[in-house]
Structure formats: C-alpha cells, structure tokens
Image (spheres, rainbow, N blue to C red):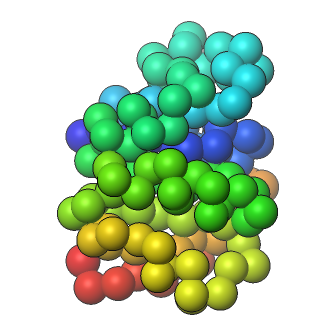
C-alpha cells in the first residue's frame, strides 16, 4: 500500500517515518525538500510534487497548515478520486469538503506525541 504524506512538517514527517518503519511505501512532500532528506534513511521517498505523490498513492494524508489546504486540494484534486484522504488540518469547517472529487474523507487530530509513536488521535470518517 502506498501512502502520500502531503506536507512533511513536524507532524507529517513523524507520521511518514512511523509508517515507513511499519513497512508501508511512503512518499512525503514538502516545498523545501532538503528539510526532509533525512526521511530517505527510513525508506521514505521525498518530493516537492504534491500532485505526483497523490497520483501514486492509495491513501493521501493531508498534513498542511489550514491556510494551505485550499491551494493543495486544488493541486491534487484530479488525483484523489476513489482514494482515502486523511486530513490533519485543524480549524476547517465541513465546507472544505465541497472541493473534493470523490475522495473518502477522514478527519484526524493527532498530537505532538506522534513524534514518539504515542499519539492519541481523534478521528471521524465518511462511510468507508
């Protein structure tokens, strides 16, 4: 199973690393790829191409800041049809889903303990 982590900041990078350590094929994106090159030592592919990462993935984790969600969704929207989209973005109204084309949405709220694989994560999902 391929998982794309779009937005490899602190939380996104920790999730990408943990998933790779569990044997998943992971691609993590960030505008400044040099900041996440260290993930390659865990088998994570890194890129700055959100759309290509989403196209290759079975599951897409959206770990960008709330003010970047609209732009990123516009970019990856053609690639999300029929896929599971997990959004970590806080503070968004349910209206943001109007821009999704056929994705199965999961909203999740991990906390900083994800850095040591001890996070308590609340989530809610569409019918999957």
89 relative to 54, above or below: below
**Foreground pick, 54 / 20:** 54
29 relative to 124, above or below: above
Question: Which residue sits at x=73%, y=14%?
Answer: 34
67 relative to 24, above or below: below
Dividing the image into 4 quarters, which one contains the C terminus? bottom left
Q: Quadrant of residue 43?
A: top left
Task: Report the side of 14 relative to 123 (left or right).
Answer: right
Question: Which residue sits at x=64%, y=43%?
Answer: 7
**Foreground pick, 68 / 123:** 68
Where does residue 118 sit, x and y in percent of width and height?
65, 55
Where does residue 110 sit, x and y in percent of width and height?
65, 64
Question: Which residue sits at x=60%, y=20%?
Answer: 39
Where does residue 51 sit, x and y in percent of width and height?
44, 39
Where does residue 83 sit, x and y in percent of width and height?
27, 59
**Foreground pick, 115 / 97:** 97
């Amino acid at each position: 199973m391929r998982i794309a982590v779009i937005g490899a900041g602190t939380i996104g990078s920790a999730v990408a690393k943990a998933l790779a350590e569990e044997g998943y094929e992971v691609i993590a994106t960030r505008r400044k790829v040099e900041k996440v090159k260290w993930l390659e030592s865990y088998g994570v592919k890194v890129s700055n191409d959100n759309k290509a990462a989403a196209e290759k993935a079975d599951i897409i984790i959206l770990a960008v800041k709330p003010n970047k969600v609209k732009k990123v969704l516009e970019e990856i929207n053609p690639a999300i049809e029929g896929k599971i989209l997990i959004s970590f973005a806080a503070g968004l109204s349910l209206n943001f889903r109007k821009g999704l084309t056929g994705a199965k949405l999961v909203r999740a709220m991990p906390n900083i303990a994800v850095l040591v694989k001890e996070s308590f994560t609340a989530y809610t999902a569409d019918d999957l």
